[in-house]
Amino acid sequence: MLDNYSVMKKIFLCCLLLAGLSCAGFAQDIRAGVQAPDFTAQKVDGTNFTLSSLQGKYVVLDFWGSWCKWCIKGFPDMKEAYAKHKAKVEFVGIACRDTEEKWKAATAKYELPWISVLNPAANDLVRVYDVQGFPTKIVIDPQGKIVKIVLGEDPAFYDYLNTVLK
């Protein structure tokens, strides 16, 4: 017969195992060469955007926030790259840790010409894409695979786009 300590120990170990299994399904393997997780999020005009709708084109996911000074500082270079390459690539700005009002205001203030969505609370893309800091840019190829991840505002990102999208 089991004593209370043994029963409690077994229950505790089962809970740890279940917690580990449930978290394992949540963690994504985000690196170059893996399929980019699909998502749907709200655009500024209130309609839904789905990442898979852009299959067949290169895509740049730009994780940013209106509160992020480096993100804002990078907008002029982003606009230049977008204007130069928009026939071959679509940029998708994902506003993170913003209210809807601040996101819409920043999108209008900085006149962002690309698709802009608000990070959905129900499916936190920061966690899904394992974003470690802001800004983070993730380049996805026409087949939907991640080919490059750039943390921070780095001129090498634009060099990479120029090389890939010649």
Image (tube, rainbow, N blue to C red):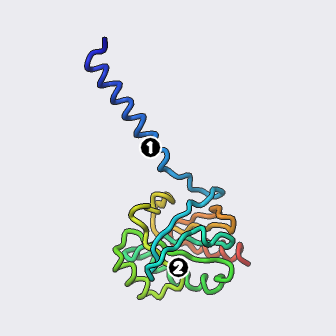
Q: Quadrant of the C terminus?
A: bottom right
> Is 43 rendered above or below residue 119?
below
Residue under label 1: 22
Residue kind at label 2, given as amino acid type: Ile
Amino acid residing under circle 1: Ser
| 79 in relation to 14, above or below | below
Q: Residue at coordinates 52% horizontally, 79% vertically from top-left?
A: 115
- Which residue reaches farthest top? 1
Q: In which quarter of the image is the N terminus?
A: top left
**Badge 2 is on which residue?**
115
Q: How many C-alpha atoms fall within 10 Å of the one at disc 2: few (<14), some, or many (≥20)?
A: some
The label number, if any, that marks residue 118 in the structure image: none
Residue 165: x and y in percent read 71, 76
Q: Which residue lies furthest to the right in this view?
A: 166
Rendered residue at 44%/61% (across/down): 123
Return the residue nearer the eye: 46 or 133.
46
In this image, 87 relative to 116: left or right?
right
Q: Do the residues labelled 1 and 2 touch (CB within 8 Å)?
A: no
The image shows residue 119 at horizontal and vertical percentages of: 43, 68
Q: Residue at left 63%, top 56%?
A: 34
Identify the element where label 2 is drawn: strand
> In the displayed image of the protein, which residue is found farthest to the front?
47
Question: Between 102 and 166, which is closer to the camera in this rendering?
Answer: 102
Quadrant assignment, res 2: top left
Query: In percent of the image, x 36 and y 76: which residue is there?
Result: 100
In percent of width and height, residue 22 lies at 44, 43
Judging from the image, what secondary structure is the residue with disc 1 in? helix
Q: In this view, does 121 lie above or below 117?
A: above
Q: In which quarter of the image is residue 80?
A: bottom right
Count all numbered tags in the image, as a single digit: 2
Query: Does residue 73 appear to the left or right of 144 in the view shown?
Result: left
N-terminal label among 1 and 2: 1
